[in-house]
Image (tube, helix red, strand yellow):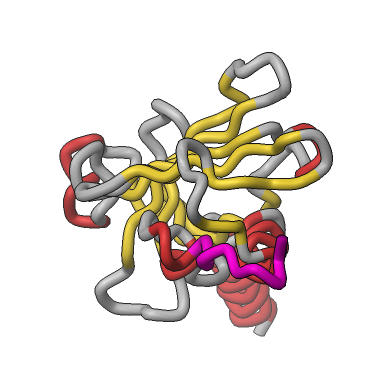
Amino acid sequence: MKNRMYISIGVLAVLILFYILNINQQKNYQSTSSQIFDFNQTQVNSFLIKSESATIEIQRVDTSWTIANNDSLVLKENILNTFFDKIFTLESETIMTKNLEKWSKYNIDDILGTHLTFYDFNNDVIETFVFGKSSSDFSRCYIRIGDKPEVYLVNQNIMFNLQTRLEYWGEKITEEAL
């Protein structure tokens, strides 16, 4: 009788041990989200968006923003505000890969990715980010920070806000605007 009780207690202890080990292993698979940008809009003097086909630079002139090297379009304030609102609320959720050879799978290599570079008031690079489209989850996208090998899945898709078309960012100057 005592033997059975010792065996039952031993089996129970082994089951509890397996349960604790399982819980600890599952903690490794939980995604955690963290803020991507460690700077804010007030530190940015200009930013450059570069895709496969085009490049556009938006820069601050005194207190207003303009499209660099363009005098026929005025910047759409609502587009700029939406851009900053979305970009500075991005959070990384899951590391997708640390393998450089898999960057093209996530559209995040130097050719396929959309590059976003922020500059400070001394025209020094604050940080460069490379964004890639997700082919399976259209509500999110991928991001690579600088030359770091990690590719993260982020909490929202901002690829639409990373347009390089002048017409997206600006509108023709009308006489009423003057």
Above or below residue 144? Residue 83 is: below
> Which of the 4 image quadrants contains residue 174?
bottom right
Please tell me in which quadrant of the rendered image residue 61 appears: top right
Q: Is residue 117 above or below residue 77?
A: above
Q: Is residue 177 above or below residue 94?
A: below
Q: Nearer the viewer, residue 114 or 135?
A: 114
**Predominant secondary structure, magenta span:** loop
Q: Name which residue lies at 51% across and 66% down.
A: 172
Asked which quadrant contains residue 105, the reply is bottom left
Side (left or right) of 97 relative to 84: left
Q: Position of residue 152 (x, y in %)?
A: 45, 52
Is residue 172 within the magenta segment? Answer: yes
Residue at position x 66%, y 85% in the image: 1
With 52 as the anchor, is 65 left or right in this view?
right
Closer to the camera in the image, 87 or 64: 64
> Which range is magenta?
169-178
Name the residue rendered at 59%, 70% in the picture: 19
Horizontal side of residue 100 vs 73, given as left or right: left
> 144 and 99: which one is in front?
144
